[in-house]
Amino acid sequence: MLAETGLLDGCEVTSHWAAASLIRAHHPNILLAEQRVLSFAGQGQRLITAGGASSWQDLVLYPIMRFAGMDSARQVSKIFLFQWHRDGQSPFAALQRNAQHDDATIGQAQIWLADNYARDRALASAIEASGLQERTFNRRFRAATGYAPSEYLQSLRIEEAKQMLESSSTGIGDIANAVGYSDEASFRRLFRRLVGLSPAEYRRRYAFPELAAMA
């Protein structure tokens, strides 16, 4: 609704990650930074936009902090059990880019990768199964899904790792192996880059309580 007024044209704003593609399609003049929880724009930073549904808490706390001071904001957060979402929205964003398209060959490749993402040479095998040249496969895959094939495969693996961290006590090294990474250190670096948290931090924050205590 705010975007329709034109007030946000040329401004850097945020919104819920699930709405990012819709906003970009209908409001190309808006500079969208959906990984942020709060974003400030306009004269005197008077336009404040919030990301995820629960980031209204940050939206409440920020003007209190801005106009009444950090101590007041901290006191309000304690009284109402509010929590700053310091890590942004990245931990919550799954494979949301263009899930529906008309390229049947790429659709079959996506299904194959979803079933075989942990295999050695998973991407090479998917390309071979498609019958396409690698360059053609890469071009069509990005056009259909919005992802480079390697990026898509990484996302599949990391999403499965997140599920395992949330729901099991399996060691991080074993999780890395289970999703297709033989080098635990490389897995940890990739996880932090894509999620914004280390695997251990993610488990402490999002696992079932009895599992988080073991992290």
Image (cartoon, grey):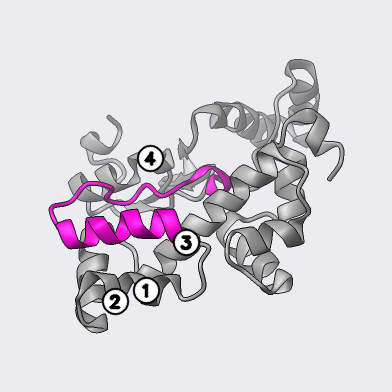
The type of residue carrying mark 3 is Tyr
Q: Are marks 2 and 1 in contact (CB under 8 Å)?
A: yes
The Cα atoms of the two marked residues, 2 and 4, are separated by: 33 Å
Residue labelled with disc 4:
18
User: Magenta segment, which residues?
Assistant: 89-117
Neighbour tally class for label 3: few under 14, some 14-19, many 20 plus, Cα within 10 Å: many
Cα–Cα span, label 1 and label 4: 31 Å
Badge 4: how crowded within 10 Å, few (<14), some, or many (20+)? some
Q: Which callout, 1 or 4, points at the residue further toward the start of the chain?
A: 4
Q: Quarter of the image holding residue 83?
A: top right
In the depicted view, which residue is nearer to us: 126 or 93? 126
Q: Earlier in the sequence, mark 2 or mark 3?
A: 3
Where the C terminus falls, by quadrant? top right
Give the residue at x 38% y 40%.
Answer: 18
Give the residue at the far right of this rendering.
214
CA–CA distance between discs 3 and 1?
10 Å
Is the residue 174 above or below the residue 67 in the image?
below
* Residue 113 location (% of width, % of height): 39, 60
* Of callouts 2 and 4, the N-terminal one: 4
Numbered disc 4: secondary structure? helix
Q: How many marks?
A: 4
- The image position of residue 172, as x and y in percent, is 75, 57
Disc 1 vs disc 4: Cβ atoms closer than 8 Å? Answer: no
Give the Cα separation between the discs numbered 2 and 1: 5 Å
Query: Foreground: 14 or 99?
Result: 99
State the residue position of label 1: 125
Q: Considering the image in quadrants, where does the N terminus appear?
A: top left
| Image-based side of 148 in relation to 61, left or right | left
* Nearest the eye: 114 or 38: 114
Q: Residue at x 74, y 29 (%)?
A: 73
Label 3's element? loop
Say which amino acid is labelled 4. Ala
